[in-house]
Amino acid sequence: MGLHLSVDNTAEIFGSVTSIADLAQFSFAGEDSQRLHIYRAEEIARTDWRDEIRDMEMEYATGISVTFNDGSKLHVAAWADCCDRTFYCDHCGQGALAA
């Protein structure tokens, strides 16, 4: 799988053409999308946008949703290819070798 980013500007409060979520999606540009997992996605968001985050929710094993101070949201669906449970996964500790 890898990485899927989705921006939701419906609750953006300033009427800006570009929201914080629009900008935040570029924090993931340098990442290997085949190896990115939700814990790394959370780390990137918290590191790059810590002063702009109002709320963050983790969706177990599938992604995160980040709400920024301007009301915009960034949804990040991310799981590394190793998380397909065929091999042991360093990130979630599950897979064939974990049994």
Image: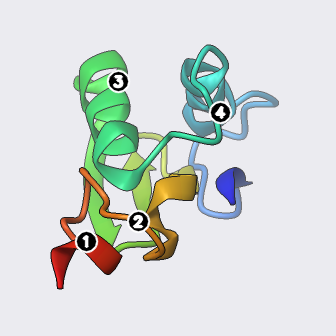
Q: Which mark is residue 97?
A: 1
Q: Which residue is mark 3?
A: 49
CA distance separating discs 2 and 3? 33 Å
CA distance separating discs 3 and 1? 36 Å
**Contact check, label 1 and label 4, Cβ < 8 Å:** no
Mark 3 residue crowding within 10 angstroms, few (<14) / some (14–19) / many (20+): some
Amino acid type, residue under disc 1 in the picture: Leu
Where is residue 33 shown, x and y percent of the image?
64, 37
Which of discs 1 and 4 lies nearer the camera? The answer is: 1
Q: Which residue is mark 2?
A: 87
The one of 35 and 74 positioned closer to us in this rendering:
35
Q: Earlier in the sequence, mark 4 or mark 2?
A: 4
Q: Going 33% across and 38% down the picture, which residue do you hit?
A: 40
CA distance separating discs 1 and 4? 43 Å
**Contact check, label 1 and label 2, Cβ < 8 Å:** yes
Look at the numbered disc 2 and give the secondary structure of its residue: loop
Which of discs 3 and 4 lies nearer the camera? The answer is: 3
Q: Earlier in the sequence, mark 3 or mark 1?
A: 3
Q: Earlier in the sequence, mark 1 or mark 4?
A: 4
CA distance separating discs 4 and 2? 39 Å
Mark 1 residue crowding within 10 angstroms, few (<14) / some (14–19) / many (20+): few
**Contact check, label 3 and label 4, Cβ < 8 Å:** no
- Can residue 52 be seen here? The reply is no
Q: Among all residues in the image, which is located at the extreme bottom?
A: 99
Where is residue 99 shown, x and y percent of the image?
17, 85
Q: Is residue 80 left or right of residue 98?
A: right
Q: Going 36% across and 28% down the picture, which residue do you hit?
A: 44
Q: Earlier in the sequence, mark 2 or mark 3?
A: 3
Q: Which residue is mark 4?
A: 19
